[in-house]
């Protein structure tokens, strides 16, 4: 039982500090009203928020954020989506969570009324972005279409909440959603991957978490490719059986060597390299499956004949659908891998621009840069 004293410690002010996006690259710290949770929503006091590559895209290009039917600039919009915190206020009818619960969040609360939401594919909600004014269909993608986590408080639908396991630090809890994306990719690829072979291309946060989750689910061997030895070494610590530095070795030949010419069952593509899909097709065996969790900036040629002749399946994933974050959080609660390894830096909320600088320039080998809010 929580005492009333502890609850009083969670009293909510009227206004809060929040970063808003003016023009491209223009973040400004402002005072904003603390939002009110509606039905099936809670108010989250944000304790920590991680910076993601997508935040950098929003900062520079606006997309994929989409606010009030357009680009997110000069709309008092607060980005940030990989956050965790404490439930401090319940909207009408909420009994699934209690005040004081520590939670991590998923990004997407689908509308719950479209075909995809009803299939559990709420990250592909057909009413994406239709959440303002007369078009309000209940969809939220915090930090994309609604206010996000570079602030002291945010509103979240209860479907987006995941309990933070006891004893897990705030910093580690911000990584649940990243692990959830990896889990969703592996789920889409087939789910039961024990004893099956997996290549992960690209040792960014999602790639590294794909190695960790894949290994925790029993994939064997797990092979990681990349260009930086420091990241590949982290991959080994997170469970990779083999790492390939593509600067020193052709990755397709290396995968063939490791699998004695057979190729692998699955590739999780997390590099976004222009030729990654063509290489992935040469890494999987006939009937193999490829999941694209990253993509190049421009359209690229693909050898479709090879895809068809070899009965190769290709999937694209968006975010962390089908409650994958709950499964990822369960693995982390059981300490099946140490997500903390990819957290490298922490800054206070006031130093968000510095945190972005560290993330973008990879200062001090930065991987996951976390902003501590409370
Ligand atoms: Zn992200
Ligand atoms: Zn929907």
Image: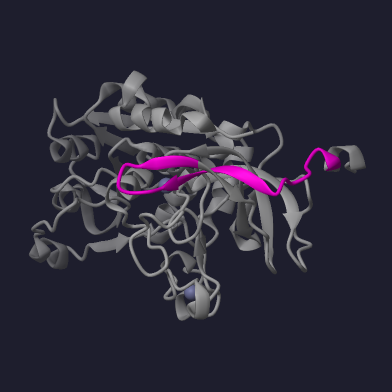
Up the image or down, 289 lies above or below 9; here it is: below
> What residue appears at the point 69 percent right and 67 percent down from the top-left corner?
40
- Asked whether, in this view, residue 142 is left or right of residue 99, the answer is left
Residue 19 lies within the magenta run? yes
Highlighted range, magenta: 8-29
Q: Pick whichever, 50 or 303, lies toward us.
A: 50
Whether residue 239 is visible here, answered yes or no, is: no
Q: Residue 102: which quarter of the image?
A: top right
What quarter of the picture does the C terminus occupy?
top right
In the rendered image, residue 318, in percent from the top left (x then y), is placed at 38, 59
Q: Pick whichever, 180 or 24, lies toward us.
A: 24
> What residue appears at the point 43 percent right and 69 percent down from the top-left corner?
129
In the rendered image, residue 76, in percent from the top left (x then y), is placed at 46, 54
What quarter of the picture does the N terminus occupy?
top right
In the rendered image, residue 276, in percent from the top left (x then y), is placed at 18, 47
Whether residue 142 is visible here, answered yes or no, is: yes
Residue 216 lies within the magenta run? no
Up the image or down, 70 lies above or below 193; here it is: below
Q: Residue 77: which quarter of the image?
A: bottom left
> What residue appears at the point 54 percent right and 80 percent down from the top-left corner?
113
In the rendered image, residue 169, in percent from the top left (x then y), is placed at 63, 31
- Asked whether, in this view, residue 43 is left or right of residue 366, the answer is right
Which residue in the rendered view is the most extreme toward the top? 364
> What residue appears at the point 63 percent right and 54 percent down from the top-left corner?
161
Q: Pick whichever, 302 or 236, lies toward us.
A: 302
- Asked whether, in this view, residue 24 is left or right of residue 239, the answer is left
- Asked whether, in this view, residue 138 is left or right of residue 270, the answer is right
């Amino acid at each position: 039982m929580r005492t009333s004293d502890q609850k009083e410690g969670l009293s909510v002010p009227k206004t809060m500090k929040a970063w808003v996006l003016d023009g491209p690259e223009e973040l400004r710290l402002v005072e904003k009203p603390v939002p009110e949770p509606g039905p099936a929503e809670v108010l989250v006091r944000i304790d920590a928020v991680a910076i993601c590559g997508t935040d950098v895209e929003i900062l520079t290009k606006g997309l994929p954020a989409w606010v009030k039917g357009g680009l997110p600039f000069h709309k008092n919009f607060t980005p940030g989506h990989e956050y965790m915190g404490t439930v401090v206020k319940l909207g009408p009818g909420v009994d699934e969570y209690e005040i004081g619960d520590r939670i991590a969040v998923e990004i997407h609360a689908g509308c719950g009324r479209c075909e995809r939401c009803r299939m559990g594919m709420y990250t592909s909600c057909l009413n994406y972005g239709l959440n303002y004014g007369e078009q309000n269909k209940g969809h939220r993608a915090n930090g994309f279409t609604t206010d996000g986590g570079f602030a002291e408080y945010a509103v979240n639908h209860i479907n987006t909440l995941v309990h933070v396991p006891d004893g897990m630090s705030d910093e580690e809890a911000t990584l649940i959603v990243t692990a959830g994306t990896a889990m969703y990719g592996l789920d889409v690829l087939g789910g039961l991957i024990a004893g099956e072979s997996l290549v992960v291309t690209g040792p960014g946060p999602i790639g590294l978490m794909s190695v960790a989750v894949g290994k925790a689910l029993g994939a064997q061997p797990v092979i990681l490719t990349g260009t930086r030895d420091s990241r590949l070494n982290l991959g080994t610590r997170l469970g990779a059986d083999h790492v390939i530095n593509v600067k020193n070795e052709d990755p397709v030949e290396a995968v063939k060597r490791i699998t004695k010419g057979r190729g692998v069952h699955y590739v999780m593509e997390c590099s976004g390299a222009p030729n990654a899909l063509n290489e992935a097709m040469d890494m999987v065996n006939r009937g193999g499956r490829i999941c694209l969790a990253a993509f190049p900036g421009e359209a690229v040629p693909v050898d479709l004949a090879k895809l068809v002749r070899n009965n190769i399946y290709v999937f694209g994933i968006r975010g962390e659908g089908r409650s994958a974050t709950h499964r990822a959080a369960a693995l982390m609660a059981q300490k099946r891998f140490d997500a903390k390894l990819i957290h490298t830096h922490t800054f206070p909320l006031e130093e968000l621009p510095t945190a972005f600088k560290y993330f973008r320039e990879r200062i001090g080998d930065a991987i996951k840069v976390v902003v501590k809010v409370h």
